[in-house]
């Protein structure tokens, strides 16, 4: 059966001051409607129902995950005692799935991306599942680059290997993490490089078998955890073992080492909405020059100002005067005012707050 | 005796969103310490005690005036039923003073200017009182211009007429309201033009007599009001008559028509702090590049940003990223983000709020 494993453990700081340790991006209605995790779950309906949807998260976020996904069975929320990167996260989910459904196919999905239309997305997961049915196959999804981004990983495709559900599938030639600007430009011009969407499809058997070969310490730890599943010792074992697992991205720990990695060209629109600027770009397409995200009663007024992004978590009037391309974010205890093109540097602010012990703002 | 008459009826919108109808600039701690009216009263101590300090204000502000001036006798707060410009305001105070002290000299002071040092300011009022002792003398104070401002009135001095308390006094040649940029520049270059500080000294007799000559309708109205003073009919009479008084600035209604107007060159530092930009300029001299005005617990963080003015009425962290010369003002229900050089245009925002009936923000 096809299961979804949603990775919702990120403690992103890129939407500070709205995002915080216990209020990460995936739990927030950054796009102005539902929390991103809620939308990620809804995007699977009806292809993958709640019983086969799993969320992997960390302890501080469990309550938030339950709140925004009220229909998920409690046992489908897997809690990492600490963050150990994506190979441990994927391994934990694969072991849990394999225990309940040895023939499980898993679609691994980030919790905080914007994707649509939904029907095309579901078709691509079906296509991935078909391709992944061949043992030892690892399916990735590539986004056709629209500009020479330096913030994404790139995947170089080789020859065409098939077509599933009308979606072309290619062998993967090479992964490149965030390239420099010159390299990114040449990638875009070559036409055979795609952004790594961070979405994968494989069977539980295939990924666990690859982990046994390429990350034996990981699989030993996961075996110990899984052996305690359903017993009183489970939580203690998890808390003891998980922090000792190798902390490696699944791309590097597994994907770059196995033979049969495939890339499907995503037939949908995609954005990782990785910054206030990305959010503006995403929403300005439909709202026009200014983007205002407020609860009812909030309002943006601009005078001699263009291209404003205004965001408030409470009823508020925000006036912008004589400034172009600014981002104004208001929360109960902090305000960010940034040039839109500099909004990705908000991590510098977050780092300074951390250094000065202002944990209540993080 | 020397009395102070503080004009505190302004409903300034230039510090929106912090200033509002019931919270005008003079009632706010714009400079980061005490409300400006409180500082204006304190600046008179010990020269003019509370019994001889009068505040003229409007009904919506009376409560605020009492709150920030707890030591003023209740009867020293004169309430205008509506704003009728400065000649009516000054006339109302002159009539009241004359009734309790027929030999009263009055120093007319704006409630919301920044002036120091205090000792030099008090010396200038003493000097003004000495000059004004000659019947028919109207004393103004001139500020040596530091740049060709177009937002102030200018006074052209003629020949020297005396020296009081070490302060030179000149006859006044001409008043010019807010000149254009070219005129302002020539004024500054000529060296005999001074900014009108809006501070005047004269005796109650002198001003009332001039009003009788040049504004007979005003004096007739004031006589009717004064005749009802101390009776049950006072409030009704005031409410009936005051709105019918001619609404003219005292500069135009009186000063430009009388013969003996003098100007004393102010021996103190002065600013009318007429905008967020002016506030920044005033405070940056001592605080350096960034100006942050917060209650305890508030904080400004800047990253790749210069020349920020951050103001909040509540505990708040304000972060500015990648933007120079911005003003960020936070209040409970509204936020202003402006380029500092455009902050005087905040009236455009206020006008739009008024037009759209957002009275709760005004």
Image (cartoon, coloured by chain):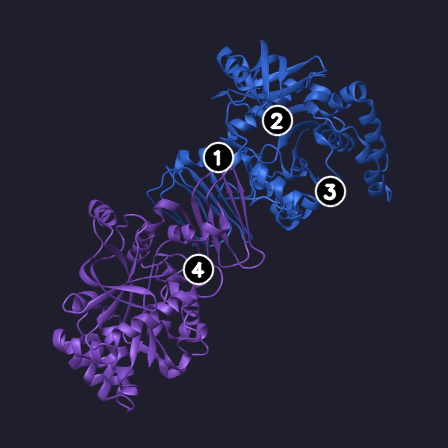
Chain colours: A blue, B purple
Q: Residue A165, how many percent across, how many down?
A: 55, 19
The earlier-in-sequence mark between 2 and 3 is: 3
User: Is label 2 in a helix, a strand or a loop?
Assistant: strand
Name the mark nearer the viewer: 2 or 1: 1
B32 horizontally vs A68: left or right? left
Front disc: 4 or 1: 4
Is A18 placed left or right of B191 in the picture? Answer: right
**Which element carries disc 1, helix, strand or loop?**
helix
Cβ–Cβ under 8 Å for marks 2 and 3? no
Screen quadrant of the N terminus of chain B? bottom left
Locate residue B158: give its quadrant. Answer: bottom left
- In the rendering, at what x and y percent does residue A260 appear? 68, 13
Q: Which of the two residues, B161 or B90, is positioned nearer the viewer here?
A: B161
CA–CA distance in space, label 3 to label 1: 37 Å
The chain carrying label 1 is: A
Checking the image for residue A198, the label placed there is: 2
Mark 2 vs mark 1, CA separation in Å: 20 Å
Q: Nearer the viewer, mark 3 or mark 1?
A: 1
- How many numbered badges does the structure rendering display? 4
Horizontal relation, residue A5 to residue A242: left or right: left
User: Chain ID for label 2?
Assistant: A
Q: Chain of mark 3?
A: A
The residue sitting at 65% across, 43% down in the picture is A354
From the image, tell me which residue sits under label 3.
A75
The residue pinned by badge 4 equals: B30
Under circle 3, the secondary element is helix
């Amino acid at each position: 059966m096809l299961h979804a494993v949603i990775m919702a453990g990120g403690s992103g700081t890129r939407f500070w001051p709205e995002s915080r340790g216990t209020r990460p991006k995936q739990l927030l209605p950054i796009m102005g409607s539902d929390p991103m995790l809620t939308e990620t779950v809804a995007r699977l309906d009806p292809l993958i129902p709640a019983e086969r949807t799993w969320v992997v998260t960390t302890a501080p976020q469990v309550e938030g995950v339950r709140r925004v996904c009220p229909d998920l069975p409690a046992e489908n929320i897997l809690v990492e005692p600490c963050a150990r990167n994506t190979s441990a996260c994927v391994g934990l989910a694969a072991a849990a799935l394999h225990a309940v459904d040895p023939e499980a196919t898993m679609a691994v999905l980030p919790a905080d991306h914007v994707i649509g239309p939904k029907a095309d997305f579901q078709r691509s997961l079906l296509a991935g599942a078909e391709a992944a049915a061949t043992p030892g196959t690892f399916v990735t999804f590539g986004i056709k680059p629209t500009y020479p981004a330096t913030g994404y990983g790139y995947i170089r495709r080789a020859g065409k290997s098939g077509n599933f559900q009308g979606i072309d599938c290619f062998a993967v030639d090479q992964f490149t993490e965030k390239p420099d600007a010159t390299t990114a430009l040449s990638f875009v011009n070559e036409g055979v490089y795609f952004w790594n969407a961070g979405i994968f499809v494989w069977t539980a058997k295939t990924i666990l078998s690859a982990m046994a070969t390429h990350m034996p310490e990981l699989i030993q730890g996961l075996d110990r955890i899984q052996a305690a599943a359903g017993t009183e010792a489970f939580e203690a074992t998890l808390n003891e073992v998980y922090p000792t697992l190798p902390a490696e991205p699944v791309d590097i720990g597994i994907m770059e080492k196995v033979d049969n990695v495939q890339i499907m060209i995503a037939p949908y629109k995609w954005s990782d909405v990785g910054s206030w600027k990305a959010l503006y770009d995403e929403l300005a397409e439909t709202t026009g020059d200014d983007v205002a995200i407020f609860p009812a009663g909030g309002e943006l007024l601009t005078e001699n100002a263009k291209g404003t992004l205004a965001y408030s978590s409470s009823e508020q009037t925000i006036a912008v005067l004589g400034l172009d391309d600014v981002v104004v974010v208001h929360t109960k205890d902090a305000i960010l005012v940034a040039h839109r093109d500099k909004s990705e540097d908000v991590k510098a602010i977050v780092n300074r707050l951390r250094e000065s012990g202002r944990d209540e703002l993080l």
